[in-house]
Amino acid sequence: MSALEYERQNNSRLDELASKITQLRGVTVDIYDNARDQRLLDSNNEAFSGLSTSIKQSAGRLRHMANNPSRIQVFRLAAIISGSILVLWFLWSWLF
């Protein structure tokens, strides 16, 4: 084999190696993107879980206030219901 043939063979193998490295880089980037997306999903899941707990606690306090009415508690309950309706109305008009 001549030096020219060795050079061509080396260039061919370098091209093959470069394509394999490119493929490996693509797989690595895909794995990183997948892990980042998973972290985002996990943080969203935690946020919604916290929101669910907060809503359950608020509903329990409202139920307690409704079961033990006093003048101030009735006023607070009416204010909370009115405020909730206003917030929902603003959200509805903003989204649609």
Image (cartoon, grey):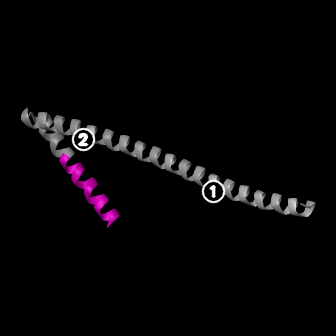
Q: Label 1, secondary structure: give it.
A: helix
Q: Give amino acid for label 2.
A: Ile
Q: Label 2, secondary structure: give it.
A: helix
> Which residue in the protein does label 1 denote?
23
Q: Hey, which quadrant is residue 95 in on the image?
A: bottom left
Q: Nearer the viewer, residue 13 or 64?
A: 13
Residue farthest along the front direction in this orientation:
1
> Relative to 81, does residue 61 appear above or below in the rendering?
above
> Which residue in the protein does label 2 denote?
55
Q: Compute the Cα span from label 2 to label 1.
A: 48 Å
* Boundaries of the magenta span: 81-96
How far across and down, in percent of the image, does residue 15 sit? 75, 60
Q: Nearer the viewer, residue 6 or 30?
A: 6
How far across and down, in percent of the image, does residue 51 sit? 31, 42
Say whether residue 29 is left or right of residue 82. right
- On whether residue 44 falls in the magenta region, the answer is no
Say whether residue 10 is left or right of residue 20. right
- Measuring 12% from the left and 39% from the top, which residue is drawn there? 74
Q: Give amino acid for label 1.
A: Gln
- Measuring 24% from the left and 41% from the top, which residue is drawn there? 55
Q: Hey, which quadrant is residue 65 in on the image?
A: top left
- Measuring 41% from the left and 43% from the top, which residue is drawn there? 42
How far across and down, in percent of the image, does residue 10 sit? 82, 57
Q: Nearer the viewer, residue 26 or 56?
A: 26
Say whether residue 72 is left or right of residue 44. left
- Give the quadrant of the C terminus: bottom left
Chain-order first, disc 2 or disc 1: 1
> Relative to 41, does residue 11 appear above or below in the rendering?
below
How far across and down, in percent of the image, does residue 23 sit? 63, 56
Circles 2, 1 touching at the beta carbon (< 8 Å): no
- Measuring 61% from the left and 55% from the top, which residue is drawn there? 26
